[in-house]
């Protein structure tokens, strides 16, 4: 029996059966269990920021697992302190960090911080964006504006009001002095890598300042160099009250973080929140290796090549390319993203049909110009095959 068949027998059906079984990777290249080679242009959903098997990540994780793999939060360890200090240094503003294991848990921390604030201030509801994605646990799911994954698990314990993403006037109408917090992605990832109109996030900041609502930036997918900046909000000219991180932070090791700026950093009292594995030494060592080895100049040097190269395909199936940095979507004129994903895999490229009409492209941040050229060269034929 093939590995895919055994997967189907052993696992719950929530993922379906993924089309490829991967065995190993090196840089931007990965190999499946049959030895077929691919160039990885999805990086485990914008996670493998240093690529696969990066020597610095391998060394840091190996050294840490052989030294001290776990302490729980009953004890302090140096990698977590170094990581929090490093994040605060990159953020350059007074803030405090909570470490979790995943994106949804980072958002649960933000959600509980916001609830703490809401209760203290007598505020009653949240605002989030339609088509936004914040995670699968019940708190984060209640903020997720995608009916197909949300509605079957409701009703939720908290009032969340959804507004169209990118519409500052709709946000202004929805946020009153009764609003606890506004949760927004600086660019919507799962919705299909959708950046907001210029000025939207600064307007959100201003609306939250005027009403006293907390502004939560979910940068779980957008941070750690993905857009060419350490943090997406740095390019948009605003500072959130709460910031959540995960995907690219650990370079493949599971870690999430919730950062609280200013007064939002001290909303939790002792005993208010915790996680046995959160901030475990191995994941912190991995995150430190990522932060020490990422080259943002490289990201900014190669990103325009990827974007303009994809745009130059000039195929009738291609409507355009949107996104920021090494985080793009090829938007199609017809809902054939699944066909593009399949044709790309056949040609040796891993991409992701993030929406029926949008193909997400998010390579490791170490992707080379030659690897980009390989995808760009193959792209017209991939589109042609998908259009058939
Ligand atoms: C992936 C993602 C999450 C959830 O992260 P998990 O690690 O899968 O729980 C939350 N928010 C955004 C914006 C994401 O892209």
Image (cartoon, helix red, strand yellow):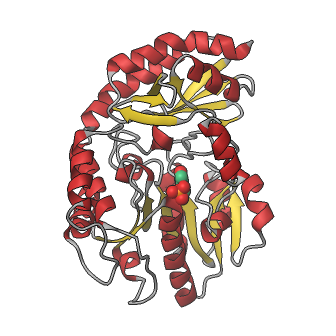
| Residue drawn at the location 34% of the way across and 80% of the way down | 73
- Point out residue 273 in the picture as x, y percentages from the top left corner: 45, 82
- Point out residue 40 in the picture as x, y percentages from the top left corner: 45, 30
Total numbered labels: 0
The image shows residue 278, relative to residue 21, as above or below, that is: below
Q: Report whether 140 appears left or right of 289.
A: right
The image shows residue 269, relative to residue 229, as above or below, that is: below
Q: Nearer the viewer, residue 282 or 10?
A: 10
| Residue drawn at the location 48% of the way across and 10% of the way down | 377
Q: Is residue 189 visible?
A: yes
Q: Nearer the viewer, residue 362 or 217?
A: 362
| Residue drawn at the location 47% of the way across and 24% of the way down | 35
Q: Report whether 46 appears left or right of 382.
A: left
The image shows residue 233, relative to residue 315, as above or below, that is: below
Q: Is residue 314 visible?
A: no
Q: Nearer the viewer, residue 367 or 205?
A: 367
Quadrant in which the N terminus is drawn: top right
Instruction: Give residue 338's quadrant in the image.
Output: top right
Residue furthest front in the image: 1
| Residue drawn at the location 51% of the way across and 18% of the way down | 310
The image shows residue 82, relative to residue 90, as above or below, that is: below
Q: Nearer the viewer, residue 238 or 245?
A: 245
Q: Report whether 202 appears left or right of 122.
A: left
- Point out residue 89 in the picture as x, y percentages from the top left corner: 22, 60
- Point out residue 330 in the picture as x, y percentages from the top left corner: 58, 26
Quadrant in which the C terminus is drawn: top right
């Amino acid at each position: 029996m093939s590995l895919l068949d055994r997967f189907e027998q052993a696992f719950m059906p929530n993922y379906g059966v993924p089309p490829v079984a991967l065995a190993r990777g090196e840089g931007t290249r990965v190999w499946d269990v049959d030895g077929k080679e691919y160039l990885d242009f999805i990086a485990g959903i914008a996670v493998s920021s240093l690529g696969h098997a990066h020597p610095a990540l391998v060394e840091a994780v190996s050294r840490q697992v052989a030294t001290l793999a776990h302490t729980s939060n009953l004890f302090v360890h140096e990698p977590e302190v170094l990581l929090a200090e490093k994040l605060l240094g990159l953020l350059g503003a007074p803030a405090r960090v909570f470490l979790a294991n995943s994106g949804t848990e980072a958002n649960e921390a933000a959600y509980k911080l916001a609830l703490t604030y809401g209760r203290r201030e007598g505020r009653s509801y949240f605002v989030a964006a339609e088509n936004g994605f914040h995670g699968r646990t019940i708190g984060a799911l209640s903020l997720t504006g995608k009916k197909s994954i949300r509605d079957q698990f409701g009703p939720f314990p908290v009032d969340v009001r959804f507004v169209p993403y990118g519409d500052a006037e709709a946000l202004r109408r929805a946020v009153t002095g009764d609003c606890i917090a506004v949760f927004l992605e600086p660019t919507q990832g799962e919705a299909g890598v959708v950046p907001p109109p210029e000025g939207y996030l600064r307007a959100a900041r201003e609306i939250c300042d005027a009403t006293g609502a907390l502004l939560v930036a979910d940068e779980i997918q957008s941070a750690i160099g993905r857009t060419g900046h350490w943090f997406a909000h740095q390019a948009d000219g605003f500072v959130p009250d709460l910031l959540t991180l995960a995907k690219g932070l650990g370079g493949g090791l599971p870690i999430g973080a919730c950062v609280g700026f200013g007064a939002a950093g001290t909303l939790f009292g002792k005993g208010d929140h915790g996680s046995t594995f959160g901030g475990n030494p191995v994941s912190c060592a991995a995150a430190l290796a990522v932060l020490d080895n990422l080259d943002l100049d490289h990201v900014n040097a190669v990103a325009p090549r990827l974007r303009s190269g994809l745009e130059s395909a000039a195929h009738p199936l291609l409507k355009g390319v949107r996104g920021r940095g090494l985080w793009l979507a090829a938007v199609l004129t017809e809902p054939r993203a699944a066909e593009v994903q399949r044709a790309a895999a056949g040609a040796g490229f891993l991409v992701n049909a993030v929406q029926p009409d949008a193909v997400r492209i998010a390579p490791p941040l170490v992707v080379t110009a030659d690897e980009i050229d390989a995808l760009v060269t193959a792209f017209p034929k991939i589109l042609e095959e998908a259009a058939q």
